[in-house]
Image (tube, helix red, strand yellow):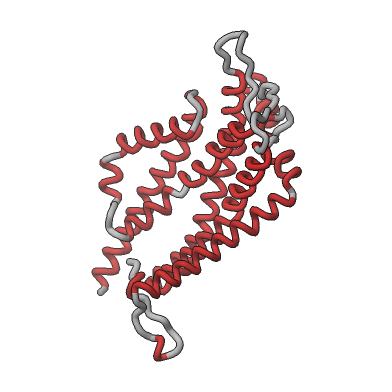
Amino acid sequence: MFGLFKKIVSGNPEENKEMGFLDHLEELRWHVIRAAISILVFAVIALIFQYEVFEYIIYAPKKPDFITYQVFCAISEAVCFYPPELQLITREMGEQFFVGITVSIYLGFIASFPYIFYEFWKFIKPGLYETERKIAGRLVGVTSFLFVLGVCFGYYVIAPFAITYLGSYTVGTEAINSPTLSSYVNYLTMFTIPTGLAFELPIVVYFLAKAGIVGPEIMRKFRREAFLVIFIIAAIITPPDALTQVLVGIPVYLLYEISIGIAARVVREKNESSKSS
């Protein structure tokens, strides 16, 4: 599918020739640089508005007025829950400074993810067939949507349940939950970015099916194994309680089922194309 090292440069006839390996590396380097610059730009913006970022984004899931708690309590008293009162502490002199830098970089990555994938698409575009270019163009939007959807799911669904569970869990009266700022941010990051990447499963399957590595038959054959692996991964990226593991595992498994349909369509189109040719 991807003739990355058979890329033909259009325009000038003298340039209309195959690019060498070093030429590809040089071009890839500039795509990576532009993607890194986009992360840096958004990170600087987040750093400038650091107070608002922490007050209205980072600290929001641990506050009782967070939208998730309000929605569940509006549904029914049976599902109503609120987070415990958590006083975040810092144990090192520069902890707040370095956490602020780290959060800015994470937010820079999340905000620039659509552009990062766009740069990736620009790199592989010349090596695609015309029909593949049209499909790949739409994939930029779909990929960005799935990533943002996964991040929002982790932030608005997983994080509130996890914070409530972990913040309320106790092994006795002598221990008080006073998490450090860095541990709180690390957990919040774990709930969001990995979930956003996990939601890219249909895109990964699409490319693997295009490359002939996977097909719908093998995905249907290993449904049970996939179900087990998905929930093991969910257990790794979530706190050790069944509820949040299910909240992550079920959507990802549904994406796996959708991916089977995507793989079947790719194989069907490849068969039709081979018959017509």
State the quadrant of the C terminus.
bottom left
> Can you give x and y, in whole percent of width and height, for residue 34 in the image?
55, 65
The residue shown at (33%, 75%) is 6
Q: Is residue 15 left or right of residue 190?
A: left
**Which residue is located at x 73 percent, y 51 percent?**
48
Quarter of the image where the N terminus is located: bottom left
Q: Position of residue 146 (x, y in %)?
A: 52, 50
Quarter of the image for residue 265 reads bottom left
Q: Quadrant of residue 91?
A: top right
Q: Position of residue 99 (x, y in %)?
A: 63, 40
Q: Is residue 230 above or below residue 30?
A: above
Q: How many marks?
A: 0
Residue located farthest toward the front when viewing the structure as drawn:
93
**Residue 183 in view in this figure:** yes
* Residue 133 visible within the image: no
- Residue 254, compared with residue 22, is above or below; it is above
Query: Residue 142 in the image: x percent, y percent?
Result: 51, 56
Q: Is residue 17 above or below residue 61?
A: below
Q: Residue at x 32, y 56 (%)?
A: 209
Query: Which residue is drawn at the image coordinates 29% and 69% (left, top)?
Result: 273
Among the 4 quarters of the image, the one containing residue 213: bottom left
Q: Where is 23 relative to 15, above or below?
A: above
* Residue ranking furthest to the bottom: 13
Instruction: Between residue 202 and residue 6, name the one nearer to us.
Output: 6
